[in-house]
Image (cartoon, rainbow, N blue to C red):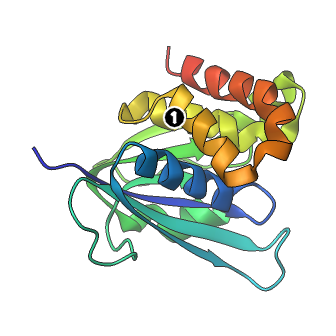
Amino acid sequence: MAFTEEIIFAGFGGQGVLSMGMMVAYASMMKELNVSWLPSYGPEMRGGTANCNVIASDSLVGSPVVAEADTLVAMNRPSLDKFEDWVKPGGMILVNSSLIDIKVKRDDVKTFYYPVNNVAAECGNLKAANMVMLGAYIGHKNYLSQEDLLDAFLKVFGEDKRKLLPLNQTAIKRGLELLS
């Protein structure tokens, strides 16, 4: 059976949304899937808008642009407002309920609300909110594991960031635990 997952990761610059997408792309590549990663961000960087399109597939990826997402990861309200309608019927929206105070309007998608900023703060570093959300994402999707993400972390950030692995491992684990 053919596998393709099209994802939009979106939030403010500085929330690690581009890193989230890059980690999913690298982890998928290491699982021998075909991938694309297409970043988009405003000129103001931190505090501005940022999003990326990620496609992971067992067949060739024809275009890096996600027209109809299987999954939207919305880390802030402007991202939910902008991309909610981009998710195909039957798709999934993961909402950072720490920062988003509204509900998804659609009833034809699966929606999950996770207070990832709050959980990251409990882990000791608010910057780990993206890793908490990635943990929740892989828990829902089941094609990547915690180990896949941690291997990808080193590819994305390099060996000099190895000291951050324990924090990120804890954050991913806490994200997985949000599903239970």
Percent position of residue 175, x then y: 61, 27
Q: Residue at x 54, y 27 (%)?
A: 146
Closer to us: 53 or 93: 53
Q: Is residue 114 visible?
A: no
Badge count: 1
- Answer few, some or many: residues within 10 Å of disc 1's Cα (few below 14, many 20 plus, some between 14 and 19): some
Q: Say left or right for 161 vs 81.
A: right
Q: Residue at x 21, y 49 (%)?
A: 3
The N terminus - image quarter: top left
Mark 1 highlights which residue? 148
Task: Determine the image quadrant of residue 88.
Answer: bottom left
**The residue positioned farthest toward the left in the image shown:** 1
Q: Is residue 31 visible?
A: yes
**The residue positioned farthest toward the right in the image shown:** 124
In this view, 37 is above or below 134: below
Task: Determine the image quadrant of residue 135.
Answer: top right
Q: Which kind of residue does numbered mark 1 sit on?
A: Asp
Percent position of residue 147, x then y: 55, 27
The kind of secondary structure element at disc 1 is: helix
Percent position of residue 86, x then y: 39, 67
Q: Say left or right for 44 vs 42.
A: right
**The residue positioned farthest toward the front in the image shown:** 159
